[in-house]
Amino acid sequence: MKKTPLAFLLNISLLALALVLQSCPDPSYDFDAFQEQTLDFGKNDQRIDQQEYETLVVGIGSSDDRRFQMFRNESGEVEHAKVAAYLKKYLDTEGTNIALADIWQPGLGTLTASSFNVSIFLENSASMDGYVDANSTSFKAAMNDLLTNLASFAATDSLNLNYINSSIISLKVAASENDVADFNKNLNRTNFKTQGGKRGSSDIGGILSQILNQQKSDELSVLVSDFVFSPGGKDAVRYLEGQRSQIRSEFVAARRNNPDLSVAILQGQAEFEGTYYDRNDKPHARLAAERPYYVWLIGTAAQIQSVLDAKILAQTRDGFTNKLVIQSASEAVQPPFKILYSPKIGSFDAKSLVKGVITDAQAARDDRNRGIFEFSLAVNFAKGMQDNSYFLDSTNYKISDAQYSLKAKPIADRNDVSLNSFTHVLTLRTTDLKEEELVIDVIGKVPSWVYSTSSEDDTKIETDANETSKTFGFSYLVEGVSDAFYPRSKMNPLYTIPLTIKK
Amino acid sequence: MQEVFAKLYEWFGLIPFYSKDMGDHLRGFDVTCTDFIATPWYSYIGWIMIVTTALTFALQYYIVDSSRYNKARHWWFFALGLVLLNFLIAFAIPYNDIQDGNFCNQLKLNVSDCVGFGFSNALWSLILLVVISSISIFRSGSTNCRHTTFWKP
């Protein structure tokens, strides 16, 4: 009897210890083992190859450790984007910095284009003379870099060089390095004239039509032009609207033949010295200014993605100031995202944030922010082709509840381990907090930079310094393309982020 | 069990000795601020508190079990040791995490949170010791301390 209570106490202690041990994850394969394995794989060769990745995923599938739930969707399937994002974050935290691209993921290779032909179309109408006549070599240097980079690009099968105005003037098929050098050397007014075609006006709709009609599915067209319309004294607005309509029709027809057709539009700046022809075809001689010019990539989404990923355009002299990618909006993609614990106004519980669910949400009660509920999301838009700035414009977002406002900012601190696999922070605020399914869509539309660099009256270009940085009729041109991809009657979501708010 | 300990240490939301952010850190909110997949400190520290309390009780009543140490003041001496030990454990673990930066940087943690959690853990160990030693059946096997409680003799 005397020993019974001691035995009882010892039993309690042993039971407690057993429970401590029981509270540890499954010893066969738990999250800690997963992390150790990840470190071994990552440190080994600074990458997670297919075999290593599959080993990790098999481990996740066979384990009942609840911590693996974050990698599973509602039906219990492993979401590879989440696994890869976590692997990167964890390895970064442990001081093994590897790129997301170095983590093998199933299906990631589907957007990788095989080799393809690249056809360069340089518009050689008279309006382009000012770029090649300029004392500054900025345009020539940019062209040189562009062509050299494209010629040496691994995915380029053959490089074809063309001028284009009223017709396509083929200069070289399957150009060699010497041909590219000759092409760059001959970028001058004399050669533009010699090569012929109707150089007197720019029929942009006609130029695009020619390119689209000869475009093959294994071909990427690269069109370089100032894209200044030439109404030739006609009613400018009516002319531009007509061109917009024609361009839309051309791209609608082209998309019918190639549903995966996409267009990237890059705006560069180069010195212009020469005669500028305004909307009435009136020449403005000796205009000397920095003027915009454009490089259009027309091809499949995979081709354009591969060129953009290889930074072929970004690595040209002076680079490009603005970029727009217009692509099929048939299926909205869910980008990797997470709800941030802070900053916030009001409060919520962190327990289900990983599932995109905010629980126990409460608006602020302090005098300063009374009634306001605000939270932030970190989102990774890096896999998309759009310019980072596209995601900063709140007008490019559509929120299912109009009571919410949205602000977007880029993530500048690359050392923040909680944000280092994300590109943007979206902050949402409302004064009408309620339980709901909140959907944030990034919609396909013409970005604001197109309108700010577009002009409808360029007749005072010599005296209006602001006008020199604009392109006559440019917004009509881009709207024509955009309308073909993003019908105005639809919302055209490119990305969608589903959230749940629970009070 | 994690949530049971969490509720205890947070005093069911009635008397918060430390911030909600510290609570989430102790629940295991990970360093990448993604999910509750880091060490579940609430569970670990909770079980450590129970085990150390049981061992302290066993130490006084069954291991030492001395007629020289069977007064209430001796009970309080053992209790003091237990309380200090549990304070130290609960203070040191999150404090080390803060010093090492081993926590989600979106949580606002400071030393007063560590003190608050240490205090909460110490208080629960004291309460548990009071409860165990107040139940006579647990004391009945002791030779010299079977009548010793926190208030007598």
Image: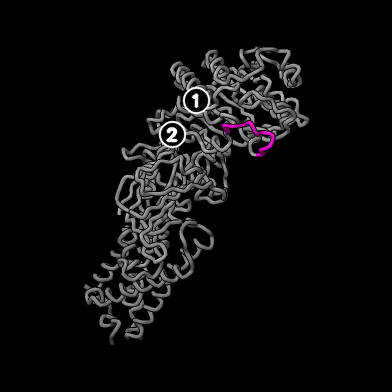
Most distant residue in the right direction: A135
Q: Earlier in the sequence, mark 2 or mark 1?
A: 1
Q: CA distance from mark 2 to mark 1?
A: 26 Å
Most distant residue in the bottom direction: B153
Picture residue at 44% right of the left edge, 68% below the top: B113
**Between A330 and B145, the one nearer to me in the picture:** A330
Asked which secondary structure carries label 2, the reply is: strand
Question: What amino acid is found at the position of numbered circle 1 in the picture?
Answer: Glu
Q: Chain of mark 2?
A: A
Image quarter in which the C terminus of chain B is found: bottom left
Residue A174 visible from this viewpoint: yes
Residue named by callout 2:
A494
Q: Chain of mark 1?
A: A
Stretch in magenta: A455-465
Question: What amino acid is found at the position of numbered circle 2 in the picture?
Answer: Leu
**Between B91 and B75, the one nearer to me in the picture:** B91
The vertical placement of A271 against B5, above or below, is above
Determine the image quadrant of residue A331: top left
Q: Residue A65's spot in the image, x, y percent?
A: 36, 46
**Residue B123 located within the stretch drawn in magenta:** no
- Mark 2 vs mark 1, foreground winner is 1
**Are the residues under badges 2 and 1 in a single subunit?**
yes
Residue named by callout 1:
A241
